[in-house]
């Protein structure tokens, strides 16, 4: 009887999980069908596999450009976030004075501010900087990277800060006595120890920045600068009725995510779990 | 000398991030408060007129805004319950040492990575074509029809897709919580003859309180701030019936060009989000038990 329950549980869990992935099945099968075939039966397998709609969607979405932009923006943002926030968090955690406490408190408190509260004044302020200081913040990928760093600062500093607190200070003291500078101590002794939390910080930020729609939609106006969520949005504005083409387009946007998931699955699940418990 | 040296290092390590953070978050926040006291259409050449607290007073007679606040609250309550129930059930199943555990965890987590905007488009198609097909074939047309064109069901569709997106994420947090419960406690209770339900109620749930605090915090704040799924799934329709708080602010500012009034809404939005989440964390933190 016990064994029967176990098999039943196995079976139910698998069904539930498959149910969760069923939308992916629906987009895959329909991305190969022509319009008539699609409306005959949306759940059936396609009669033949032609990549015609993929090629068309790729062209209409400017997919390769969007992929390049998304990769450039995400990778650069995350790298700079890791470098700057780990340095800041370490200094704040190891310098025990009022100023450090205040700075850390401000980082934590601002985590509660929704993006919608900042978006309009942020855009105003960024265009002021663009116009008066001639630093191109608006409508450039680098300007967007700058803003992504600002928005990710709080959570990243918070995660690093908690981790640094758990490292015994004696290690650093030994290195300092040996004559290493603060810079040397941090990069040679501390940063390697931070590796587990660095993985968490990277994964959380990659997911957020890769999927972000609203901030890029406000800052990037040039067609050639669009990220994947942006080009998906404009693509749907133009081709909603042609669902087979739309399905191929959606499939294209999911492929990079699936590749990322397959390559880094263990780190992602561990990273998310640890990031939340902190 | 040593002290001055240290100050230099302090500045070198912290200043770059603090400067970026100030320009992107802190300064815009302050400017935002300033704007909320003005009436302005967003065009630089046009004057900003100081109106004091008028924008905030106007909010109380803005029926579309009040409607949107109520809808967002209703959505948040439903979404928080459904995400946490689904997430917790999956977490309990996945950690009960089944052979399908790993593959199930992988699949359930997948939607979270795809992102709200794209999930919304996928589900738009499913409601439009797959639901109507199932309705026609099975005859349950009262349940399986295009939810997105019905004023009430469109909101449930939003809850459904939001659950689809978030449940896997919350599941991972509960899994981490369950795995941190020491095995000895479980074994001891089994020797004492505690039933499955007694163990769940008296051991698992109390020890899961920290995970519960975090999961509630994450679902509460992300449900209340929902935008991407809202935009791609319903676009606020039909007839503004699913225009959530965040979308209402966006439309007020960039759609109607009421920059000052929209910013006043945005400031209120901040106070509500901060108020709700801090209260929740305070309440659930008190119930956490130490082992």
Image: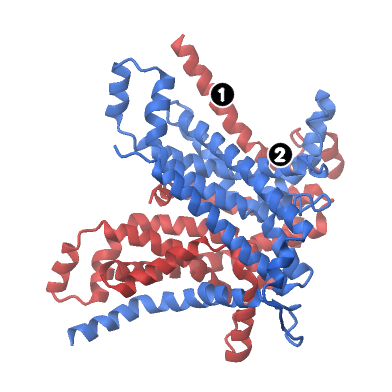
Chain colours: A red, B blue
The kind of secondary structure element at disc 1 is helix
Q: Quadrant of residue B78?
A: top right
Q: Quadrant of the N terminus of chain B?
A: bottom left
Closest to the observer: B85 or B202? B202
Where is mark 1, residue-wise? Answer: A12
> Is A105 placed above or below B111 here?
below
Query: Who's the residue at 53% across and 74% down the image?
Result: B24
Q: Are marks 2 and 1 in contact (CB under 8 Å)?
A: no
> Which quadrant of the view contains residue B195?
top left
Q: Position of residue A137 (x, y in %)?
A: 59, 80
Q: Nearer the viewer, mark 2 or mark 1?
A: 1
Q: Is residue B158 left or right of residue A204?
A: right
Q: Residue at x 32, y 19 (%)?
A: B190
Q: Position of residue B83 (x, y in %)?
A: 57, 40
**From where the camera sits, is residue A41 visible?**
yes
Q: Label 2 to label 1, Cα distance in Å?
A: 21 Å
Chain where mark 2 sits: A
Say if residue A65 shows up in the picture: no
Q: Which residue is denoted by mark 2 in the rendering?
A: A26
Where does residue B157 sit, x and y in percent of width and height? 72, 41
Where is residue A97? Give x, y as percent: 27, 72
- Whether residue B127 is situated above or below residue A197 in the rendered picture: above
First in sequence: mark 2 vs mark 1: 1
Query: Is the residue marked by circle 2 packed among few (<14), some (14-19), or many (20+) residues within 10 Å?
Result: some
Residue B213, numbered label: none
Looking at the rendering, which quadrant does residue B46 occupy?
bottom right
- For label 1, the crowd category at 10 Å Cα-Cα, with few meaning under 14, some 14 to 19 and many 20 or more, is some
């Amino acid at each position: 009887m016990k064994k029967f329950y176990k098999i039943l549980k196995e079976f139910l869990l698998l069904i539930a999980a498959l149910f969760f992935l069923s939308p992916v099945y629906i987009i895959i099968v329909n991305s190969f069908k022509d319009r008539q075939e699609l409306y005959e039966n949306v759940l059936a397998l396609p009669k033949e596999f032609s990549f015609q709609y993929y090629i068309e969607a790729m062209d209409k979405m400017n997919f390769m450009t969007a992929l390049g932009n998304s990769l450039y923006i995400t990778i650069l943002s995350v790298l700079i976030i890791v470098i700057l926030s780990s340095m800041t968090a370490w200094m704040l955690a190891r310098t025990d004075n009022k100023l450090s406490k205040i700075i850390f408190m401000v980082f934590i408190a601002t985590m509660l501010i929704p993006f919608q509260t900042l978006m309009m004044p942020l855009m105003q302020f960024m265009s002021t900087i663009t116009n008066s200081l001639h630093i191109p913040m608006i409508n450039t990928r680098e300007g967007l990277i700058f803003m992504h760093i600002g928005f990710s600062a709080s959570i990243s500093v918070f995660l690093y800060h908690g981790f640094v607190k758990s490292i015994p200070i004696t290690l650093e003291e030994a290195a300092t006595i040996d004559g290493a500078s603060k810079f040397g101590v941090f990069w040679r002794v501390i940063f390697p120890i931070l590796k587990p939390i660095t993985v968490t910080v990277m994964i959380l930020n990659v997911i957020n920045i890769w999927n972000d729609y609203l901030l890029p939609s406000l800052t990037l106006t040039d067609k050639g600068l669009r990220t994947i969520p942006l080009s998906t949005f404009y693509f749907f504005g133009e081709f909603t009725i042609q669902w087979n083409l739309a399905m191929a387009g959606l499939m294209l946007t999911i492929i990079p995510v699936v590749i990322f998931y397959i390559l880094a699955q263990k780190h992602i699940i561990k990273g998310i779990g640890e990031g939340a418990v902190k | 000398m040593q002290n001055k040296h240290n100050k230099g290092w302090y500045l070198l390590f912290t200043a770059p991030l603090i400067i970026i953070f100030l320009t992107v978050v802190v300064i815009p926040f302050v400017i935002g408060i300033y704007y909320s006291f003005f009436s302005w259409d967003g065009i630089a050449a046009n004057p900003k007129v100081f109106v004091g607290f008028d924008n905030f007073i106007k909010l109380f007679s803005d029926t579309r805004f009040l409607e949107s606040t109520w809808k967002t609250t209703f959505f948040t309550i439903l979404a928080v319950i459904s995400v946490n129930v689904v997430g917790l059930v999956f977490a309990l199943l996945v950690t009960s040492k089944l052979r399908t555990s790993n593959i199930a965890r992988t699949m359930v987590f997948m939607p979270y990575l795809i992102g709200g905007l794209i999930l919304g488009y996928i589900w738009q198609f499913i409601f439009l074509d797959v639901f109507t097909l199932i309705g026609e074939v099975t005859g349950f047309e009262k349940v399986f029809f295009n939810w997105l064109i019905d004023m009430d069901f469109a909101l449930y569709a939003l809850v459904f897709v939001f659950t689809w997106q978030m449940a896997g994420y919350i599941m991972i947090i509960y899994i981490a919580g369950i795995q941190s419960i020491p095995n000895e406690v479980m074994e001891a209770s089994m020797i004492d003859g505690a039933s499955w339900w007694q163990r769940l109620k008296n051991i698992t749930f109390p020890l899961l309180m920290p995970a519960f605090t975090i999961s509630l915090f994450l679902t509460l704040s992300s449900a209340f701030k929902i935008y991407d799924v809202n935009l791609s799934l319903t676009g606020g329709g039909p007839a503004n019936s699913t225009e959530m708080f965040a979308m209402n602010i966006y439309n007020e500012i960039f759609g109607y060009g009421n920059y000052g009034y929209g910013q006043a809404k945005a400031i209120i939005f901040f106070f509500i989000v901060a108020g709700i989440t801090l209260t929740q964390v305070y309440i659930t933190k008190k119930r956490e038990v130490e082992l």
